[in-house]
Amino acid sequence: MFKILEKKYLANNIWLMDIEAPRVAKSCKPGQFVIVKMDEEGERIPLTICDYDSKKGTVTIVFQTVGASTQEMAKYEVGESFMDFVGPLGCASELIETPVEELKKENILFVCGGVGTAPVYPQVKWMRAHGIDVDVIIGARTKDIIILEDEMRKVAANLYIATDDGSYGFKGNGCDQINELVKNQGKKYTRVVAIGPMIMMKFVSLLTKELNIPTIVSMNPIMVDGTGMCGACRLQVGDEIKFACVDGPEFDGHLVDFDQAMRRQRMYKTEEGRALLRLKEGSTHHGGCGNCN
């Protein structure tokens, strides 16, 4: 059993929990995720890792209550436990695998939206711990739904807040803020990392392609099973078929077919849609077994 040590309401039905999971915490790297199961009958819920402490043996998760399972999860209190807490899963951020001296030569911009701020935080924290300064944009519709601002200010070289309604920081979305920094302020970035809703990552990638800035996106929003067996997170990345949970979750944003990914996500919500996807995609529908028996 995996005990909840801390629970905090962040904003907009978004919760943070610190979970006692020493074996998971010992192996965590930024960019990875865990699968949580509340009880024997509970759904498997993939969640990105927001933070971890190998000495304390804790892993921090952030989730938004968007369905029955996450609403039930939000009812759990400090002292109660989840039955399963499996991880770390997926591949670590490619930046973490890059030699530190090479990263110090770069000028990296992170762009996060909504709950996407949570998986950005451990990457930026890792950068700061290794002497690498990076800029961060947090985008939101309005001030009230911004999360982890104070935590991010402690680790980012420069933090830019952008709100659609102008209630806080720069008035505009993340793309508008990128344009402001690059085109109006003359900032030069060697790489962009965008994590958030798929539509946000799509438009950031379109903009950075225009600006000729290599871009990494994290496709964790489309994961369901977390093992490559369900076919939910199947992606077209350039000429290749990939699965976010086993091949990612990070990919080249300029190669991801976001329109296809968003269509599949809508179709996957119904039994009829899943059946059609299995029929059309055949042996490439699964990332694990390659069969649909």
Image (tube, rainbow, N blue to C red):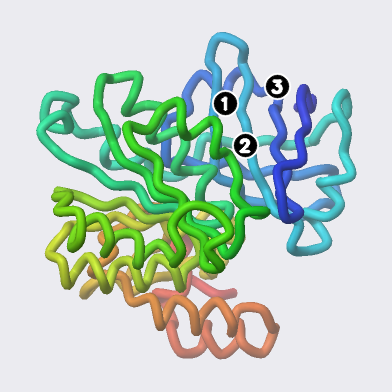
The image quarter containing residue 241 is: bottom left
In the picture, measured across the screen, residue 253 lies left or right of residue 54, that is: left
Task: Give x and y (percent) for residue 23.
Answer: 58, 20
Check contact, mark 1 vs mark 2: CB within 8 A. yes
User: Which residue position is annotated with label 3?
Assistant: 20
Front residue of 44/80: it is 80
C-alpha span from label 1 to label 3:
9 Å
Rendered image quadrant of residue 265 = bottom right
Q: Which residue type does callout 2 highlight?
A: Val
Residue at x 43%, y 83% (from the top left corner) = 281
Residue 282 position within the rendered picture, expressed as x and y whole percent measured from the top left: 44, 82
Q: Which residue is mark 1?
A: 24
Q: Residue at x 85, y 27 (%)?
A: 78
> Could you tell me which secondary element the residue under label 3 belongs to?
strand
Q: Which mark is residue 86?
A: 2
Tag 1: residue type? Val
> Is residue 187 shown left or right of residue 11?
left
Residue 171 seen: yes
**Which residue appears at 78% of the width and 27% of the height?**
4
Q: Where is residue 92 shown, x and y percent of the image?
A: 37, 38
Residue 269, x across and y down, in percent: 66, 78
Cα distance between the residues tagged 1 and 2:
7 Å
